Each structure stands twice: as structure tokens, then as C-alpha cells.
Image: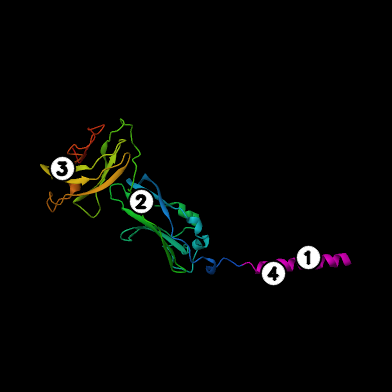
Amino acid sequence: MKKLVATTVLALMVTGNLITAQTRIKPVTDELIPKNIPQPKIKLKGKNILQNNGQNFVRYELRVKNHDLFPDTLFQPAPELPACGKNTAASRTWVDIVEANSGKRIYGFCSLSQSADMENLWFAVKANEEPPGCVQVVMTDRKLNRVYKSNAVCLSAGESPDDIADTPVGQADLKVRQFLFPPNETKALRVQIANYGNAVAQANVLRLTVRKINGTPVGRETEIQVPSIAPGKAEWVLIYVDQILPKNVALKETTFKLNIDSTKVVSESDESNNETWHNLN
């Protein structure tokens, strides 16, 4: 009997110690969320072409490199806060992708469940539209009204073409890799010039020639300077045509050609790929 009593007392002591220890464990509360959380640091992971409802889109993928410095508590469901559409238990912290210059919202995430989800942020742009130049990620803790804004990442800065071919040593090779019509500019064109060679392409001239307006042959030209481009790199330039087109005519509706290094100042391994057409029938 004495042994049983001793065992019972010991068990009660252990249980009491466990209860005491548990009461000393603080639950994760807002007070435990550091006030000196750093700003998010983002990186462009890459881009992919995708289709949706018969349309082509370019999907840009981003990641928050230091996501592990943000506690998961920030992303717990918050039914007491305003809903996100029909989601009445959206996450406490919403993550938005915005234009770096204007702060205009591009896309957002209101249902992330943990900080690691910020490894896979993205937004998409129609393939024939101009993407934003640079973007940022903005995190908004809706409960504590704290905002965390990331560094800016430019989508085309230092971009390397993924289709570079081998060229003779010491020669550049310029090519108009793609061009996009800015959505709010009917008389402008955003052009990506790539150097597929393995030598620096010195500064040169990009010429745009409008060959047809409403089916009528014309020969209207405008030019801009293109900066030097390092081997295997690409640069974006913006060219305006408001001086050579009627007010009621959009560049997209015309037939035109682009010619890089139009004055032949760059020694290239291939001089036959400098010309690109739009609406050539």
C-alpha cells in the first residue's frame, strides 16, 4: 500500500510539473512577431509561355528569397478580417505584385497559408502586350496594418536570349528578337534587340520603315539610337512613330519593317538576319 501511495504521489508531482511547464509556454501571438522583420527580397525565376482560352500569355515567375524570415503566423486564416471575394477566411497577410514606378497593382495572392508559398509568386501578361518594366512585391499584414515592400526587379535587365547559336570568335550578331505594342500607346513600339554573337555590338541605329497604310504603299522612316550590347545579352528600346503616321492610324494597323544596324557600323557574323516585318502579306 505504501508503494502504491508513493507511486501515486510521484505521478501527481510529475503531472503537476508538466502542467506548470505548459503554462509557461507562450502561444504564438502578435507580440511575438518581430517588429524588425526585414523587407522581402525578390528574384525573377524565369518566364514561360502558356495558353488560356485560345490566347497566348507570358507568365513571369518570382520568388521571395528570404521568405523564411517571415513567420507562418502572418499567413494564418483571418475570418475576422474582410473577405477576399468569396473567401471569408482569407490569409491575414496579402501579397501583391505591383509596378515599381507607379505602384499600380498587377496581381495578388490572398490565400497563402505559409511563408514558403512566397517561393512561387507569378503574374501573366498577354503575349502581344508590353510587360511592366520593373515590379515589386508588397506584403500587407492586415491585422497589424504593417506593410513590407521588396526591392524592384526589372523583367528585361540583363536578359540573356535562350536561343544563342555558336558564332565565329570576335564577332557580334544583332537581331530583332521580338517587339511588343504598348497597350496605351498606338504610335509606339517596344523592341528587344539581342546580340547572339560573342563580341560586343557597338552602338548603332534601329530604323522603322512604314511600307503600307490602309493598303496604300508608302515609305515613311524613323530611327533611334541603340546602345552597345554585350555578347549573349538583350536590350529593350522604345521607338515612337507619331511624326510619320496620321493621327487616326495606329502603328499596329500598318505594314512596317524593322532594321537593326541599318547604317552598317557593326561587324557581324550574319548580316542577313537584321530585318523583321509586321503585317507583311
Label 4 to label 3: alpha-carbon separation: 83 Å
Secondary structure mostly taken by the magenta-highlighted segment of the chain: helix
Label 4 to label 2: alpha-carbon separation: 53 Å
At label 4, the amino acid type is: Thr
Residue 209 is marked as 3
Label 3 to label 2: alpha-carbon separation: 31 Å
Q: Which residues are magenta?
A: 1-25
Q: Earlier in the sequence, mark 4 or mark 2?
A: 4
Q: What residue does disc 4 label?
A: 20
82, 102: nearer the viewer: 102
At label 1, the amino acid type is: Ala
Q: Earlier in the sequence, mark 1 or mark 4?
A: 1
Residue 58 locus on image (x, y percent):
34, 47
Q: Is residue 23 magenta?
A: yes
At label 2, the amino acid type is: Ala
Labels 4 and 3 touching (C-beta < 8 A): no
The C terminus is located in which quarter?
Answer: top left
For the view shown, which residue lies furthest in the right direction? 1
Residue 214 locus on image (x, y percent):
13, 45
Residue 124 is marked as 2
Relative side of 18 to 146, left or right: right
Label 3 to label 1: alpha-carbon separation: 92 Å
Q: Quadrant of residue 139?
A: bottom left
Q: Earlier in the sequence, mark 3 or mark 2?
A: 2
Residue 11 is marked as 1
Label 2 to label 1: alpha-carbon separation: 62 Å
